[in-house]
Image (cartoon, rainbow, N blue to C red):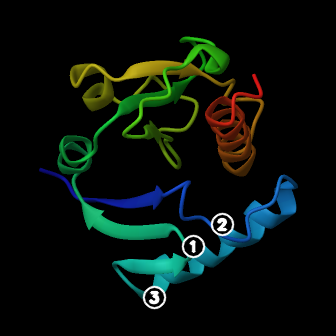
Amino acid sequence: MKEHTIIVFHGSKLKRIYPDERSLSGVYRKIIRFIKNRKSGSPHTGIYVSERSLEDLIKSLHGSKYYIHNKGIDPLNMEVHPLGVNIFLSYGETKNMEPPTLCKKKKLKALKIPVKVFNLDQQIAIIQSIIDRRLHKWI
């Protein structure tokens, strides 16, 4: 099974991430520098990097599981499970392409975020904002 560099954002543990995109952009650059020098660890509070298969990661997570795609359910209608929400974003060669076969095979639901319009940092900011609002009953 092919290993990937997996970046996990633990929303409840993230610190110093603000609604402006520059904040997340800076964290994203920090992650890239970290990956170039190491295989695994924590480049920022609440963010973890590891080399493992996507299948192993999917098996280990609990709660709602989604992947980002141009077609899917409206993010405002996603299930916010008490055990958490896990959202898989594809970056690199698979960006703007068909959803990862493994995500479909494992029955993850597609979450509609126009990947051709929003950068990775914007996608993360949108998702985190919606989840925070849902958890706090603002929407």
Q: Is residue 103 left or right of residue 95?
A: left
Q: Characterize the local packing of mark 2: few (<14), some (14-19) or many (20 or more) Cα atoms within 10 angstroms.
A: some
* Residue under the point 64% across and 77% down: 30
- Residue located beneath label 2 in the image: 28
CA gap, disc 1 to disc 3?
Answer: 10 Å
- Residue located beneath label 1 in the image: 31
Q: Position of residue 90 (x, y in %)?
A: 49, 42
Q: Is residue 68 left or right of residue 115?
A: left
User: Looking at the picture, which amino acid does disc 3 mark?
Assistant: Asn
- Residue located beneath label 3 in the image: 37
CA gap, disc 1 to disc 2?
Answer: 5 Å
User: Looking at the picture, which amino acid does disc 1 mark?
Assistant: Ile
Element carrying mark 2 = helix
Element carrying mark 1 = helix
CA gap, disc 2 to disc 3?
Answer: 15 Å
Q: Quadrant of residue 119?
A: top right
* Foreground tag (1 vs 3): 1
Determine whether 139 is above or below 33 in the image: above
* Residue under the point 57% across and 12% down: 71
Tell me whether circle 1 and circle 2 mark residues in contact (CB < 8 Å): yes
User: Looking at the picture, which amino acid does disc 2 mark?
Assistant: Tyr
Q: Residue furthest bottom?
A: 37
Tell me whether circle 1 and circle 3 mark residues in contact (CB < 8 Å): no
* Residue under the point 34% across and 23% down: 108
Pointer 2 or 3: first along the chain: 2
